[in-house]
Amino acid sequence: MLAVALGLPGCQSAPAERPDTLVDLATVQSGPRVQADELNGALRQQPGNVALLSRRAALRLAAGQPTAALRDAATALDLGDGDNEGPLYFLQARALRMLGRLPEALAAARLAADNGFTGPELPLLVGETHLAAHDYPAALDNLDRALRLDPDQPAALFYKGLAYAASADTAQALDYLRAALAREPRQPEILHQLAFLYNAQRNPEQAVRYATRGLRLDTASGALHYDYGRQLELKGVADSAAWYYRRALVLDTTQYRADYRLALAAGALGQRPATIIPHLARALRRNPRLPEARALLAEALEAHNQLPAALAQYRLLVAENPGNAHWTFKVWKVGNRARLLLPDSLRPALLYYPGPPRARPPAVESLPPLGGLPPS
């Protein structure tokens, strides 16, 4: 009785229960890539099965394997009898767009249309491809076609907003981005674009609304961290803005605007050139046209005594600003300083600064002789 009360095992103990085991999710195989691989055996038995090839091509594309998807689609088109080829050409267009082969993607989209593919996805893809190619009128035309087929398509509204923003029509861009957000309220990319445009308008009160909403949805977005930092900078909260810029770069090293803003802030505070140089160098690799960035980098390199690198930047400034006397003088000055760093055997002759070109005065005509006498 005591043993039973204490729960101790008696003469005939019950079988031990098997402990629960958690499944290692990393070992669970699913998703489009695995489904595509599962079709390999069936295709080995039926290599000419167009339906299986089309299915595997779609799965390869969904798995982020556009090259493999293109191979399967091309094989399916070669083996097909010419019927219902529109979806395969559309898949080809999507794969080519994913690979960045924009003219080929547009050609495949035209073939899809010629072979009877009429869904709203086609003008949406063509419009987005034209947008990527910076052909904004063509992008807007095709996105309008997509919206006529599906007026509530958030992707078409979003891309129209981007096309108007790239065309410097900010009011239209904001209208379409807000319309896209109304249909997809939990899409961080739409919130980022709205926050970015309001910051560009120097309207931090509106920008913070969208940046805050976006960060609640995606705490790992470098773009949204930049947006939040930019509205803080516009409000004059420089220290907090710098923290968000640095966080943006930790999350996404392609956020070159964060590098640029950190460099500008460091320069304004008189920080050492060594602090400024890495930010400006990274920013210029992403966008060589950032205002004043190359001039700041060249001067910081010169101040840090990195003369060959500074000379290269000054030469680029002369190429970008032909005839600019200041940058021409800097090339001469830093070039001579850089020559002094070379060994005597490699040092070229000293160059003299020619100065700005001077206009020669016109020749003075000879005066007539006095008294009308011929010159002696």
Image (cartoon, helix red, strand yellow):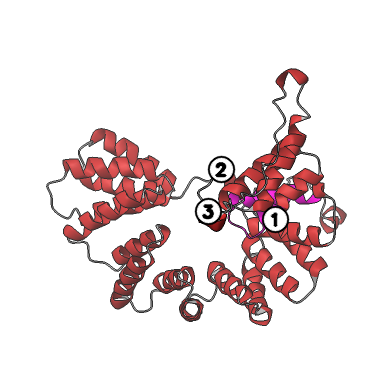
Would residue 294 be seen by someone viewing this image from the given angle?
Answer: no
Residue under circle 1? 259
Mainly helix, strand or loop, the magenta region? Answer: helix
Q: Secondary structure at mark 2?
A: helix
> Which quarter shows the C terminus?
top right
Residue under circle 2? 27
User: Tag 1: residue type?
Assistant: Asp
Q: Tell me what residue is drawn at x 29 percent, y 77 percent.
A: 148
Mark 1 vs mark 3, foreground winner is 3
- Front-most of residues 197 and 111: 197
Would residue 39 be seen by someone viewing this image from the given angle?
Answer: yes
User: Tag 3: residue type?
Assistant: Glu
Q: Earlier in the sequence, mark 1 or mark 3?
A: 1
Q: Relative to residue 215, is residue 21 depicted above or below?
A: above
Residue 253: in magenta span: no
Tell me residue 246's x, y (percent).
74, 57
Disc number for residue 365 = 3
- Front-most of residues 213 and 84: 213
Task: Please give the count of numbered marks on the rendered protein.
Answer: 3
Tell me residue 198's x, y (percent).
60, 76
Mark 1 touches mark 2? (CB < 8 Å) = no
Q: Earlier in the sequence, mark 3 or mark 2?
A: 2
User: Tag 2: residue type?
Assistant: Thr
Residue 284: in magenta span: yes
Chain part drawn in magenta: 275-295
Q: Quadrant of residue 354?
A: top right
> Which quarter shows the N terminus?
bottom right
